[in-house]
Image (cartoon, grey):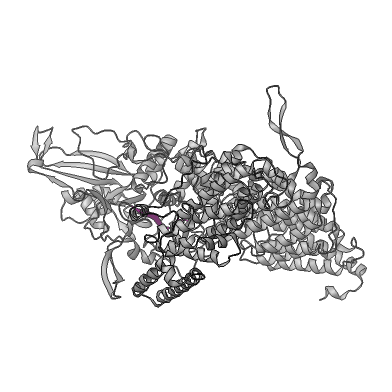
Amino acid sequence: YVLGTIHDKAVAVKRYTPIFDSIVKTLKNYESIETSEVEIDHSLTGLIKIAQVIVEQTFVEKQPNTGFKGNAQPMLDTLFHLLFRLPSLVQLSGNPPPQAKSHQSRSAAFSLLTEYAKDHEQNYRQIARKTLMQMDSNTIRFMNDVWKYSWVEHCKSSAGYVGLVNLGCICYMNSLLQHLHMLPDFRKEVLSLECKVKEKQESFLFQLQTVFGNLQESRHMCFNPYGFVHAFKDYEGNPTDPRVQHDVKEFFDLFCQRLEDSAGERSKNLLMNTFGGILEQQIIIEEAKDRYKDEPFYALSLDIKGKQNITEALEMYVQGEQLTGKNQYKSDELGRKVDALKRVVIKRLPNLLILHLKRLEFDFGEMKKVKVNDFCSFEENLDMRKFTKEYLDRQMQKEGKEGKSEEESKRPAGYYEYVLHGLLIHTGSADTGHYYSYIKEREPQKAGEPRWLEFDDTIVKMFDHLSIPEKCFGGTQISTQRSKSGRPITRRIPRAANAYMLFYERVYREPTQQVTQMEPVSPTRRKCNNPEDPPLPPDSPKPADDSSVPPLPSELENIPPVDAGSSKKNDNDMVADTVDQLQEEPSNLKPNMTPQKSQQSLGRKRTTQNDPADSKQPASGVMPPKIYEQVFNSNNTILKNRYLFDDDFEHYIANLVRTRSGQEKEYMDLVHPSKCPEILLNIKLISRYIIEVLTRKKNNEDLPKWGQHLTSLFQNNIPGCLWFLERMSDDPLTLRMLLLECHVPMTRRVVCKLLTSCFTILAPYERPVYNDTIELPTDSKSPSGQKNVRMIHKSVILRIIHHMQMFLQDDHVSRCWRNLEQFFRLLHNFAKLGKDERDFLTRTATIWRLVDFHMGNDSPYAQQRRWDMGDEYSEPQFRDMWGLLSLLSRICKTGSKTVPPTQVDQPREIHQDVRALMLDAKFLQKMMGNTQNVRATIDLVKHWIWENELSNQWFHQIFQKCVNDTNYDAVEPLYALLDEILNLKDSMQRERVAMYLNSRDGLIDKAFRYRFQYPLFTYGCIKKLMELARDSSTAAGQYLQDNKVQLRWVCRWLETHIEHSAQNQGEYDSPAKDVNAIERQRSKVHTLQEWQTWLCMEEDDEILYARQEEPVINTFDDDEDDEKLDHFPTNDMNDINPEDIQ
């Protein structure tokens, strides 16, 4: 209000200049408190709004360069800096850019930009150029399968963690990788390992580091681990087949072995210090010296069948077996067999104890694998003292004596105590199922107690730990179902979802130790046992059967390496941002399963965004530079798309465009866009926003309005049309995606209308150069060292049409059969522009391309198996394709005596191969059977049968074959075609009528022969004959009038058919069906009355029924007729060669 009280603009500028300069300086170096979209910096928003009021109050319309709009450069640079600046590799501490993140601050900044562009040509151009630069780095358009994009759905979940994409059946892999990633020290050490393999795409270690790096620093919802799947080889060196499910315990064993192979001693130390423990196999003999053997382990496999809890399973594990009787142990020391105790005890406990619950076993009775869903509970706190060597030895030597052994006394506090930190769940049966994980945070992202999280492939969400007994213990549950009578039936069924692996973390963290030669070899490197050695424990990891790991499918054979410098990334390459995303913890989920004693985490505290330390790598794990740069660049990409696809940006573009409303001038001269860039800024801005952003945005309901506005601009701007078409022709990938691969019909319709509008406007200017070509240099060189050139059409319209013709030769187009409607509509619209356009399509064999494409595997030119189009629920939309084929075929010469009335343009000779393919029997049957564009079929058939005897015979055979193959209730399109054929007035009309009505396989003959086996078909034929007979002025009506004698059997048959239908009417079990049956009966009675009237026009009933029922011509005796009823007659189509039709 105060700013608006000064009415003298010059005084206002002088007074407000210090304030405005101070605002610009403050905004330039402003440290925003907005760390996410939900946090608002009111000071930032207020400064921008004050600046806007100053700009509005000091602007003079007739003097645009006065006031603050005249010197807009500093403020414009600052505003774009606030809105679109991206983090750099060194901007990981504090609050990363851009400073304006909330809806309020960004809306204020966009509003100020719009105010600068209003009524100021120079500012508008500058703002438009800067805005176009923001879309230059947008890479979303290179993702073929990304449509209806929403940054909210692609960003990291509210839980603050990243999921993994399931490529088929790799949930076992995803669930375990999430557990490993959530171990801070383990993740940090893996990321710091040196990968010496040059072929990074084949390196297990590098791909594992890539997965961990993306899970750690991602701003995406999920990461695609296709590189890791390819690099993880089985024992034979074959990549993992993502289509085959595996046991997660087997995967863990092989994972540890591959990690040992990749980094040598350092990785072995890492595994032993994290998961490694030592088992001692004991053979205890009373009469001789005991035998001991140490074996390392990474996980303990427990038999839980019939066990109520984990404690019982562990007790059973260390209980041992008495070797007596026939099973006595042979002692080398005594030289004889003696009684002994064989058992396995835990000599050294690991820092992270993994318990594998044996829920999959082989049933020898049924000879198949089964799942054990028995109830087995476990506690959050687990004391492992009773299962260790020192405790069990003390129990044997000093039974009943209280206290601790000397070995136990040396152990630090918390050595035997474990706290539950993770669960790996299996749901389903032994043959099929799914893995997912529940994990407790070790490094909470926010102050407070660690949260429990659920990791289910791409989905990461909060988990209520209080539901662990219900979701993880197994057992049975009550299920209520209803019987057929509606009575509820209650029964107990097994709980298919239960814990498969448990992850317990020790309260006391042992210091890192180096594995020496004196220590046991790694669990994955055990050598074969000596025959005299005691047997291994039942849980000892064994190599998986090599034959159980299938090869990688062909589509994943050649996976490209991760390229950090690539500017084009697909959906698998998109990874998360290095900027930590602040998340809120739900207040209603407060885990109370905390350990009773203090515990030390496996990793150090994670550095938060507010830490003052400034480093180029995140403190939670230093990853290889190549992975780090790739992750960082990809994160900047999603951050860029995040703001381009926001609704605030759409409103900004709309308001910016409105500032030019009514100020656009007409440019109707064909001038190349490079010579008039200033007049194209508005078209460029709208076109690029529509094509690159709005077509892929999820909430794009206003896309048709944007398209209409752009079309109106094209009407008055010839260079703009030329620029738009050149941009589309130079990027055939975008053209194909928008017309074929896009599954959103509205988007395809808008793009089709835009291209059609440009074709219509530009065609009159380009027709003179339709036959001209230009040379375009290529990157390749000839043997002489000169650069090769390729010839392209000088017309930009023809370049786009040429791209579309090439698409038809790609089998990928057939895979997009659901999206073909607008593709063929654009070609059809081009053909309807004029004679020159149709001539171009004809001479470039478009007819041959269309017929060959539609015939698919039936085409004689199909050299390999093609993709089948259509399914049982839907069929491709070929309406415009039939229209285009009909239009182009009516340009061709047919060999008729006179020019057909359906002829388009000057008759043109076509190649004999094109003619033969277009008149192929299989293709014509498909065309006559199409119901999407019956008019196109009628025009094509009428064109070819005009005054051509061979064509008449050929098309008659095709027509009769179609009638035979079509269901009785789907022949209406064929009858519509029959009407047009019979009414075609040329010199062969009477012969044609007789051929279609009363020849062998004619309509009368079909109706009579199939009257008993196919009465509904016969009734349809009779109705059609009555329809033709009503109008005696037509050739068909006159022919039927002259041949009444052959139709006198119709009345008697109709009476019998109506009587039979009435007897079956009581079979209908619903009122609706009963009503429909009554209506059909009335229709049949009416048809009978019409036939009786028509047949009795000259003779009375007695004379009519006194004559024979059968037709005079082409009748069959009873024996012959019965033989014919078992199958439809087949037409001999080898009598006429399509190539002879001229």
Q: Which sits in the foreground, 223 or 803?
A: 803
**Quadrant holding the N terminus:** bottom right
Residue 438 painted magenta? yes
Q: In this view, does 769 lie above or below 969?
A: above
Q: Give the range drawn in magenta.
A: 432-443
Give percent across and percent down for residue 269: 40, 40
Considering the whole magenta stretch, tell me its main secondary structure.
Answer: strand
Pick out the residue farthest to the top: 784
Q: Is residue 561 above or below residue 124?
A: above
Left or right, 916 with respect to 430, comes to right
**Quadrant holding the C terminus:** top right
Q: Which sits in the foreground, 787 or 210?
A: 787
Residue 770 painted magenta? no
Q: Could you tell me if residue 1098 is visible in this image?
A: yes
Give percent across and percent down for residue 156: 54, 57
Tally of marks: 0
Give percent across and percent down for residue 79: 75, 59
Give percent across and percent down for residue 740: 60, 51
Pick out the residue farthest to the left: 325
Q: Which sits in the foreground, 642 or 428?
A: 428
Q: Is residue 1142 above or below residue 830?
A: above
Q: Could you tell me if residue 635 is visible in this image?
A: no
**Residue 74 in which image quadrant:** bottom right
**Residue depicted at x 36% and y 70%:** 1060
**Residue 754 in which image quadrant:** bottom right
Left or right, 330 with respect to 528, comes to left
**Residue depicted at x 31% and y 55%:** 429
Left or right, 365 with respect to 888, comes to left
Q: Which sits in the foreground, 729 or 1017?
A: 1017
